[in-house]
Amino acid sequence: PPDGSRSRTGSSRGFDSNRSSSSRESSGSDAEAAGADDRRDDLLAFYGLPRWSYAHWVQKLATKLVESKGTAVPFRRVAGEAMPHQYIVLLLRCGFSLCFTIFAAAHSECDPGGVVRSHPWWIWFCLMPLSVAQLALIVLSCKITIIPVYQNNKSFQSMGRKVGFSTWFAVSMIRSAFACVDLGSDGAFLGGFVKETSCQPVDRDKV
């Protein structure tokens, strides 16, 4: 064929090649944009949580990071704010355990056989202040850490199963309350054991 025909054929092939390359680049950029949008939606899914469940400043920080960098809130950015609450919970539990043990020992009575009888029923009401304070501090810590935890895990789990936020929160609170009752029962047992060391069995023959 003439040289002009060859050059036109080569030009059309080059044009087709460039067009297919630009098409692939365009589809690739569209896929990346769609993936970025999906990730952004996933990171902002915490807006589906109840408003009271997260702190306002953590929500603002999470939104800023998602909009500017497309990243989740690093847990280390908020963990420091929650640690004081957990230190207070630890001190409360340790202090209460010691005080409740002494209190249980002081209000336990020995039976004639030298064994401590059951503790008075009203002693268990002493657990209420600790339970309320502990649950309040746990909720405050949850409000600080719930967004980064949810952004990374994408769901809530309880006993190995995925559950909704309400179920997860209720189960967590119940477990915390049971942990408080367990602490009280341990203190009552130890207090009764301490009291029993000073119990003397009554000699019925002398009586």
Image (spheres, rainbow, N blue to C red):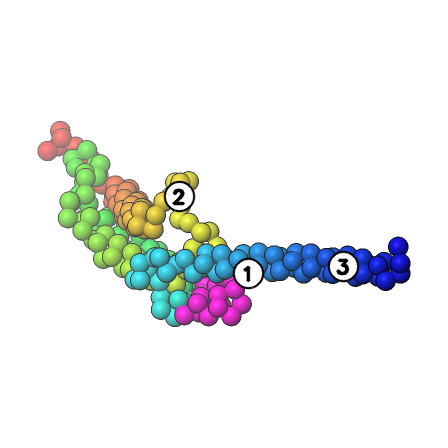
Amino acid on which the number 1 mark rests in the picture: Ala
Which residue lies most toward the left here? 207
* Cβ atoms under marks 1 and 2 closer than 8 Å: no
* Residue 13 position within the rendered picture, expressed as x and y whole percent measured from the top left: 77, 57
Count of labels in the image: 3
Q: Which residue is mark 1?
A: 33
Return the residue nearer the eye: 102 or 15: 15
Judging depth in this view, the residue of 179 and 16 nearest the camera is 16
Q: Which residue is mark 3?
A: 12
Quadrant of the image containing the C terminus: top left
Q: Which residue shows up at 62% across the image and 60% down it?
A: 26
Q: Which residue lies under the disc numbered 2? A: 162
Q: Residue furthest top?
A: 205
Tell me if residue 93 can be seen: yes
Does label 3 or label 1 sit earlier along the sequence? 3
- Of 172 and 103, which appears nearest the observer? 172
> How many angstroms separate mark 3 from mark 1 (CA)?
31 Å
